[in-house]
Image (cartoon, helix red, strand yellow):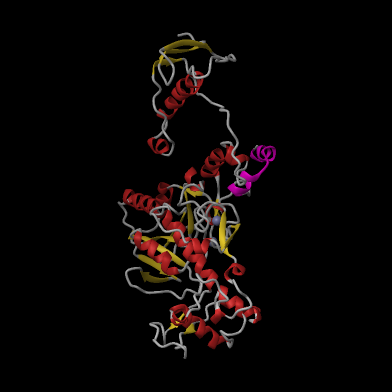
Amino acid sequence: MSVRTTIEIVNARQNNLKNVSVEIPRDRLTVITGVSGSGKSSLAFDVVYGEGQRRFLDSISTFAKSRISQLKKAKVDYVRGLSPVIAIEQKKGNNNPRSNVGTVTDINDYLRLLFATVGTGSCPVCGHPLCQRSATQLAERIGQLPVGTVVELRAPVSRPFGEDYSYVFHQLREKGFKNLIVDEEAFSLADKRELDETREYRIELLIDRFTLRHDRFIQLAKSIEAAMLALDEDIFLKIEIPSGAPEGFYDGFGCPDHHFALFEMQPFHFSFNTPASACHTCMGVGLSYVVEPRFLVVAPERSIARGALKNTVFNASPAGMQSYRGVQMYSLSQKYGFSLDTPFRDLPKYIQDILFFGTKGEPIEMLHPPYAKKKNWSTGRTRPFVGIATEMESWYRHYIRRSSTTEAFEPEFIRECMIERVCPECGGARLKKQRLSVKEGGEDIDRLSQMQLQKLLAFLE
Ligand SMILES: [Zn+2]
Ligand SMILES: [Zn+2]
């Protein structure tokens, strides 16, 4: 059989093409010309490129295909003589100031593929290097343990910036998880137990717990695979042997001190357009909105009781003074020894800071203000106070999260008190921290996508 020297197209009917049959010489530069609307682009992109791409995609796995938007079959009887195709389209640049060479071109797609294939991770606690391991590889290693060994598969749980534990637990319950391990102690999500919001805990999700049997290798591999799927947000799995693992068990496979192993990764693990991979705080935008306290004070010469604060933030009317917020203000003034009648600008800076950013974990006893006629429901209780600005930011984040799924009402009164900042959690990198902990040649994917093209190419060589 001779090698074809042309690409033969028969009866192309895509868009404006009217049964066009044509032979295009291969290995030559060919220009397609014609009046506007005659179907030049349809012939080049939809028929030639589209068919080449579609045939290539047909040859890859169903899994990979499901992650690529499939091209429709072009309207043409047949195209012969195609080899793998590449299309360079004319592109209008977009004016987004956050775009870089990586995102405007498709370089980021290749970087994601690179990281998913050869990126190495590190233990989230101590930074011990971790290589990617498949479910089968993990099962093989675990299967070498003596029969009867109890094995636990766990995953680290992180709290998004500025969120409380109750929010995190709610999310986990919604995903159907039940068992946690908090500071090495069992903790059931079925109990309505609460954690001290001002403390840091080491929280892990207990995904599976089983006893090794000698004839159950396939089941073991399946359990591990199920754990990987359950953790679509995560790339680390902790393999814990409660009775103590034999010496050398974690060598080359996990962190010997903290028992974390790294899963096989996929390109979507490095996409900030995938909610599970995007930074929790900025949702993959790289910027976040913070409340600017100056915007909350409308009349610094007035006191809190006379309307120094924005009406939507604290209403100093007689009813407002008796509301939950009014009782809270009165209780704060009693605890920290200031007056609600002092002009706001004369309040010491540390008092203003407490009002905006909270008591740093110090609980507030809710007192009955002498001016209040009715008793507020909160009187006599002890409540945390995180500050007016912090509260508003947290409401705003809840709104942002909900707004992607439902028609949530936009909290305009919060938005107008906010300014734009680089996201405090990801520093503008838009990905979750654990994704950024994966490195190639010592750099994370964000650093590489910010590199100048020449430097990047030299780096990748
Ligand atoms: Zn470690
Ligand atoms: Zn972020």
Residue 74 rendering spot, x and y as whole percentages: 40, 22
When asked about the image quadrant of residue 71, the answer is top left
Secondary structure mostly seen in the magenta stretch: helix
Q: Position of residue 339 (x, y in %)?
A: 58, 86
Answer whether residue 296 is magenta in the image: no
Q: In the rendering, at what x and y percent does residue 266 appear?
A: 47, 44
Q: Position of residue 8 (x, y in %)?
A: 46, 12
- Closer to the camera in the image, 224 or 278: 278
* In the image, farthest residue toward the bottom: 370
Residue 350, above or below 115: below
What residue is at 53 percent from the left and 61 percent from the top? 415
- 370 vs 129, left or right, is left
Numbered label tally: 0
| Residue 206 in view in this figure | no
Q: Which residues are magenta?
A: 444-460
* Foreground residue among 348 and 142: 348
Is residue 377 depicted above or below 212 in this figure?
Answer: below
User: Is residue 456 one of those drawn in magenta?
Assistant: yes
Could you tell me which quadrant the N terminus lies in? top left
Is 1 situated above or below 242? above
Name the quadrant of the C terminus. Answer: top right
Residue that appears at 42% across and 59% down: 409
From the viewer's perspective, is residue 201 above or below residue 216? below
